[in-house]
Image: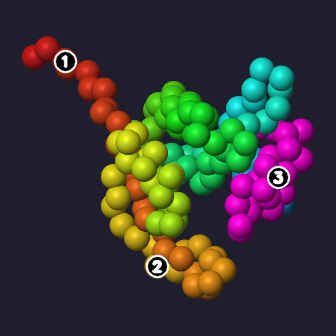
Amino acid sequence: MTPADLAEVSAVEAVAYEFPWTRGNFEDALRNGYLGLCMRDVQGVLIGYCVLMPVVDEMHLLNLCVAPASQGRGVGLALLQEAVRVTRTEKLFSMLLEVRPSNQRAVRLYERFGFVAIGRRRNYYPAAQRKREDAIVMRLTFPQETSHVAA
């Protein structure tokens, strides 16, 4: 993801979420060195993206979005696989994320991928009727490669 992608990213975000990130949120993420990944179809149309923030020894998945017209086609899984590949390339050993309990499709994707719920953030997300919604905190831990030195 580069600044040139942000008009499309913001447009997808606006139709995919009731409480979308703003273009400014994406600009700040890129300016602060976070990693943005974009997925495009064969015609070059943006079908999904994610934003990753490296923190000490783990990666925080801040945003993963699939364009509504492309949902249910494996795009989210492919983005998640790429996010994990990037995380491993950065030599980080876990990935952390927050997800709305009401977003059962995303919760199921993360659980199938191996993420485990490790906590809850109370009143984390804005919500229309309830005013706020909790977040489920999930983590995926990768096996650490160790080197064995002969004694």
Q: What are the residue bounds of the magenta stretch?
A: 1-23
Q: Earlier in the sequence, mark 1 or mark 3?
A: 3
* Residue 140 locus on image (x, y percent): 38, 45
Q: Tell me, for residue 69, which label it has, or none.
A: none
Q: Residue at x 53, y 36 (%)?
A: 77
Check whether the beta carbons of the residues at disc 1 and disc 3 lie within 8 A of each other.
no
Q: Is residue 42 visible?
A: yes
Q: Amino acid at mark 2?
A: Arg
Name the image quarter holding residue 15: bottom right
Badge 3: residue crowd in 10 Å (few <14, some 14–19, many ≥20) = some
Q: Which residue is mark 1?
A: 149
Q: Secondary structure at mark 3?
A: helix
Q: Secondary structure at mark 1?
A: loop
**How far apart in space, not on screen, are marks 1 and 2 (Cα)?**
46 Å
Residue 13 magenta-drawn? yes
* Residue 60 locus on image (x, y percent): 53, 51
* Residue 69 locus on image (x, y percent): 73, 42
* Residue 99 locus on image (x, y percent): 51, 60
The quarter of the picture where the C terminus appears is top left
Q: Earlier in the sequence, mark 1 or mark 2?
A: 2
Q: Secondary structure at mark 2?
A: strand
Q: Which residue is mark 3?
A: 10
